[in-house]
């Protein structure tokens, strides 16, 4: 349930990042829109339905196409369906917030979304997801149910942050000649805004924004709630809580601990020397492996 809710919000964030990047290009290129779909892992599904990567087709494919299982509307539908199945395990406030999220987005996404009203729609998605999260924190007992909810959130969030960062190395720059240029720095700042981290980064670093500092903030800073380090730390933490609840240590806990330690023990200089894209690719593979192991350990796959 909470993986789906987080996925809906993160898809909106990814779309917003790509949209802002597209606004910085004046040549009308569709590469940015193609990059968004590729980063979301939906290239095959998109190309089966659309001949070109136009803004309109990408926006509606990612926001409202129910045949795309990772679209915002499909994710919220699945989250609500799961919530209804386990309704007695949720507080009334969490169920109501989830149901109201579904109703609000169903109304907002009933018609195609244009670039003109895209910002307003994306803000609504983020707001509704935040309300559900707030209800969870404010009303749920801190037991295994809460731990699973947070596990789903942080696994999905770390995956999303890694993908949003990785989009930088696919299409953000027209060529390697732009690395370190003013265009490069502006586009890195777009990445910060896409994960609601612009103000936090400014508090810590003032005006000293550079690709390396921003990447370090979003990968290694444990104070940033969408960083890879923070999410990895939280996944390991909630798996420890489940070990205490069930008195069983699972393989997923070992994997989570290794991922968290690897992120914590890696310097940003090392990441850039070895390749940011390669580091993020390895992180994404390990995250998928961890998610599959959690399903196996706790029998979510039946």
Image (spheres, rainbow, N blue to C red):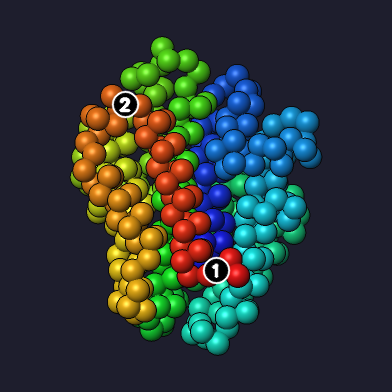
Q: Residue 280, located in which quarter of the rendered image? A: top left
Look at mark 1 in the image and give the residue it sits on.
300
Q: Position of residue 288 (x, y in %)?
A: 48, 50
Nearer to us: label 1 or label 2: 1
Instruction: Return the residue nearer the eye: 240 or 55.
Output: 240
Left of 198 or right of it: where is 39? right
Distance of label 1 from label 2 (alpha carbons): 36 Å
Q: Residue at x 45, y 43 (%)?
A: 284
* Label drawn at residue 113: none
- Number of marks in the rendered image: 2
Residue 41 falls in image quadrant: top right
Image quarter of the N terminus: bottom right
Expressed as whole percent of the image width and height from the top left, the position of residue 214 reads 30, 36
The earlier-in-sequence mark between 1 and 2 is 2
Q: Position of residue 102 (x, y in %)?
A: 64, 68
Q: Quadrant of residue 37?
A: top right
Q: Residue at x 57, y 43 (%)?
A: 40
Residue 191: give x, y in percent of width and height: 42, 38
Q: Quadrant of the C terminus?
A: bottom right
- How crowded pointer 2 is (Cα within 10 Å; few <14, some 14-19, many 20+) is rated as few
When the figure is inspected, residue 34 is found, relative to residue 199, above or below; the finding is above
Badge 1 marks a residue whose secondary structure is loop
- Establish if 204 lies above or below 167: below
Q: Nearer the viewer, residue 289 or 159?
A: 289
Q: Which disc number belongs to residue 274?
A: 2
Q: Are marks 1 and 2 in contact (CB under 8 Å)?
A: no
């Amino acid at each position: 349930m909470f993986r789906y809710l987080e996925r809906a919000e993160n898809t909106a964030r990814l779309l917003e990042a790509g949209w802002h990047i597209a606004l910085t290009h004046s040549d009308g290129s569709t590469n940015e829109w193609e990059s968004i779909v590729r980063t979301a892992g939906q290239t095959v599904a998109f190309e089966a339905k659309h001949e070109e990567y136009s803004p309109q087709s990408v926006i509606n494919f990612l926001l409202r196409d129910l045949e795309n299982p990772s679209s915002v509307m499909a994710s919220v539908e699945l989250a609500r369906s799961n919530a209804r199945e386990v309704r007695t395990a949720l507080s009334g406030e969490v169920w109501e917030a989830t149901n109201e999220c579904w109703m609000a987005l169903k109304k907002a996404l009933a018609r195609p979304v244009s670039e003109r009203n895209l910002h307003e729609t994306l803000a609504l998605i983020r707001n509704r997801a935040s309300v559900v999260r707030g209800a969870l924190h404010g009303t749920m007992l801190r037991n295994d149910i809460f731990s699973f909810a947070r596990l789903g959130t942080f696994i999905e969030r770390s995956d999303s942050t890694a993908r949003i960062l990785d989009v930088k190395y696919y299409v953000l720059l027209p060529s390697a000649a732009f690395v370190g240029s003013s265009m490069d720095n502006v586009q890195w700042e777009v990445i910060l805004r896409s994960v609601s981290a612009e103000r936090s980064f400014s508090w810590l670093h003032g005006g000293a924004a550079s690709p390396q500092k921003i990447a370090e903030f979003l990968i290694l800073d444990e104070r940033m709630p969408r960083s890879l380090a923070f999410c990895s730390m939280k996944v390991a933490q909630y798996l420890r809580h489940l070990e205490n609840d069930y008195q069983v240590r699972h393989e997923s806990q070992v994997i989570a601990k290794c991922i968290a330690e690897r992120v914590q023990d890696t310097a940003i200089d090392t990441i850039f020397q070895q390749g940011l894209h390669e580091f993020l690719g390895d992180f994404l593979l390990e995250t998928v492996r961890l998610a599959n192991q959690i399903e196996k350990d706790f029998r979510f796959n039946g």
